[in-house]
Image (spheres, rainbow, N blue to C red):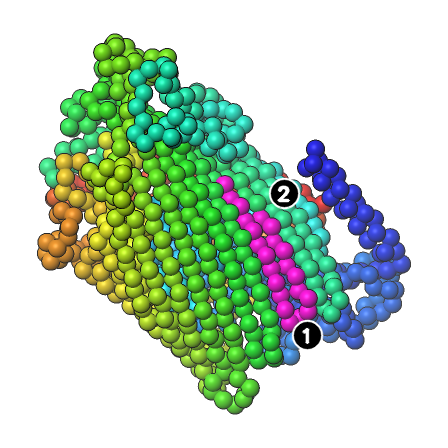
Amino acid sequence: MKSQSTLKRALITLLFVCVNAAVFAQGTGKISGIVTDKKTGEALVGAGVKIAGTARAIATDSVGRYTISGLATGNYSLEVSYITYASRTVANIEVKSGATTTLNINLEESGTNLNQVVISGTANKESATALNLERKNATVVIQKIGAQELSRKGLSNVAEGVTKIAGVSVVGNKSVFVRGLGDRYNNATLNGLPIPSTNPDQKLIPLDIFPVSVVKNIGVTKSYSPELYGDFSGGAIDIVTKDYPEQAYFKVGLATGFNSITTGKDFYTSTTDAKNYLGFARGDREMPAIVRDSRAFYSESPSQRPGFGAAWSPQKITAPLNTGLSLSAGNSYKLKNNGKFGFLANLSYKNDYRYNDGISAIYNAQQAPDYYYTTDRYNFVTNTSGLLNLSYKPSTKSTYSFTTLYVNDSSNDIFDQQGYKSDIGFDIYARRNGYTQNSLLTSQFNGVNELTSRTKLKYALGYSNITGSTPDRVQNSFLDNGDNTYGFLRLNDGDNHRFFADLNEDDFSGNLSIDFASKDENSIFKSMQAGFQGRYKDRTFGARQIDTKIRVGGRVNIDDVDSYLGDDKLGGVSQANSFNYQENYYAPNNYDATLAIAASFLNFNFEWNKKLKLIAGLRAEYSSQNTYYKVSGQTIEAPFRVKTLNNFDLLPAATLKYNFNDKENLLIAASRTISRPLFVESAPFRYNIGFGLAEGEGNVELVNSVNYNADLKYEFFPSSSELFAVSVFAKYIDRPIELSLINSAEPVFTYINTDRATVAGIELEYNRNIGAIFGSSSKALKNMSFGINGSYIYSQIRISDETINNSKKPIAPTNRERPLFGASPYLINFDYAYKHNWSEKSNTTFTLTYNVFGKRLFVAGSQSAGDIYEMPVNTLDFIVNTKINKKIGLDVNFGNILNPTIKFQQEYTTNNLPYNEYKRGFNMGLNLNYSF
């Protein structure tokens, strides 16, 4: 009832505001139009439009449109300006009562930066034009993609968005690789503040949990600067959330989707209740109190029944259409002294039914399979997010903002494997019924104060809490009799079990910096930045496995396991057709970890003759990383061991930038950075991803890597929205951390410091308007544009005899020299767009996108077994974005049109063998938006 009354009050307030606005508008008129580039016809976002002789001014919006309302009848003059464009004044514009005067204005580019009109708005950082201008003035190698481009290309989350940036790829829709360097070499921040990961196996938070509905833009910084955290070599990814709009709006979005191999087909899921559908079913599968309160749970009697939440067998349904819903609202209010208050709120939900079938195998040195399975995976995923942004500007010299973001990501995964495992000697059938729910809650406060005309103070505080839960994952294993009948596999107690895992991580961070500009315009010293940063994060992780000792013989129905393993069947070891629970205590299943960072930095900016700039700086960073762990064989009562990694690092960086003219520049950068082992890499926790599949465990002996980075970049901006850029980069990494197989009977992966690694490459970007290429005045050609970016990356890692002999983990890599894990030798992105204007208020944009990555290392082989590679995948999408009128928008997405086979292969000198193969299916999505 409380939420309903709140909604009623909100609607009444909105109606009251609208009525008052309508009354106020009587007797006045408006001037409205679009500001464009005269040559290309492209909209200019953030152009200043001012009523001459008054303080009334506004910035054009995301499509170049402006509207100045509340004007008394009469004649006016407009002053229009945009950086690097010649300003224009249009006189004798007549405004009539109750009418809108339409005035479209085009501007010509100028070779110099003219005096600009001071406007009350700011450039829309969601647009490609505004981000291009920001990039042009940047003193680091950086690329950004804004919300408008994300929408035009039909991208649904941040993980998909970063793949459109040159040199960036995503493995498994989660692990980000920048210039061939994986998760540990990259950073992720939200509005400039660090953010922890919901996945205990990753440093970067899975980027697919961020829907584009909360994103203003995504930036990837590829060259280091001392105000960034020193744990960096590949890229620093910053997700900037949306902020308040200039005008009031309320928007509703509905979405649905279809997949060619899933929708309308048989599908398995744990449950069909509302909590599972919405992604909040963790509570229904929580560890029972009788288990939680026991230090080593054991049950052999119905009187000791635990009452686990998850059923042994999943439910069979017909996969429905994917669905989504989004709500967003915002407004801003003018205050006295040119102040302003604004807010934006966004709420979204979406789900996705996914299915794939394929194979999974791994081979030994003799090319015989250790296992070979056919697989079926049914995955139901949800994503729910809420964003609230509040901004208060008491004057033009101070800004304060508060942002809070909540994201909940769930996955109900049914994974079936059927096939041969060599150490068992016969065929098996295994099924995992798992559920994960990961949540992020982050709150941030940012402030900027202009202390003097030359001094600016910036500060920020952030807190994030991450929870990750795998409650009551069920595994059943069966013998395959070969005639479509099965019996329980009972070779090991762990063949059938229930598994629980929980992660909780708190992350506190703060930034403080002061910018100082020189008073002497003739001095080569232009500005200085000094600052301090601090971060502290604390992780607690625990896992428990409850094995099932089964005494049920004969044939069983694999789709009705509950009839054999219900709590009423609990019994002692001598009781036939019974089972009992016994916890499989493994000491390393629990660990805690902390990381404390304190850093200060200085940046100096020197400039000669308006063309040559030198930005040089130094970061002093102290870090203390502690891992609290147990090793195999320790008892429950045994204390945790502690591994401490303390480091003090001086991290210099320098950038030299030369502006040939207003459209061309050259940038050279060099830096020294570090890479730390992840918590999970230095904790001996062992995790199994599936029945009979390889396990992974950490290594407490890991130390930091040291990275040396160099960049050379040339950029040419033909117009405000066009770009040609070439980048060359090189990196040398001392003691890189890599994944390696341990010599053991069962395949187990661990992490080791190898000797050294080198990475080098070249990146190319070209975004152009087709009309500008041919110098055509054709409106159709002016509305066509394309973009292409490509990367060639060379990487090599070396593992010496000394590294192998000194390793405390027994390793025997098949190849001592090989590419870095996850590094594709080439990446290509291409998109073509055509915009057709049906009327002043209606248009359609057609976009075709293509992506391909080169063969990349997935797992390094051991003991003469071949390395495993993921093969190239060609992805083609087609998106149609239609603005029907000012209120209604309709988007149609055709994804994965080619539907290629995703292939992994294990490579030997004489043969290549399949490791994993599956298809994702063709997707079609429909999104309808209505703005009130």
- The picture places residue 675, in percent across and down from the top left corner, at 31, 60
Say if residue 193 shows up in the picture. Answer: yes
Circle nearer the viewer, 1 or 2: 2
Return the residue nearer the eye: 852 or 394: 394
Which quadrant does the N terminus fall into? Answer: top right
Magenta segment includes 392? yes
Residue 58 image-quadrant placement = bottom right
Is 548 left, or right, of 765 in this rendering?
left
Residue beneath the point at 44% across and 42% down = 467
Residue receiving disc 1: 117
- The picture places residue 780, in percent across and down from the top left corner, at 59, 56
Is the residue 884 above or below the residue 113 in the image? above
- The picture places residue 699, in percent across and down from the top left corner, at 23, 49
Is 487 left, or right, of 237 in this rendering?
left
Mark 1: secondary structure: loop
Residue receiving disc 2: 327
Mark 2: secondary structure: strand
Residue beneath the point at 28% across and 10% down = 577
Please report the bounds of the magenta region as a residue range. Answer: 387-408
Is 167 left, or right, of 282 in this rendering?
left
Magenta segment includes 550? no
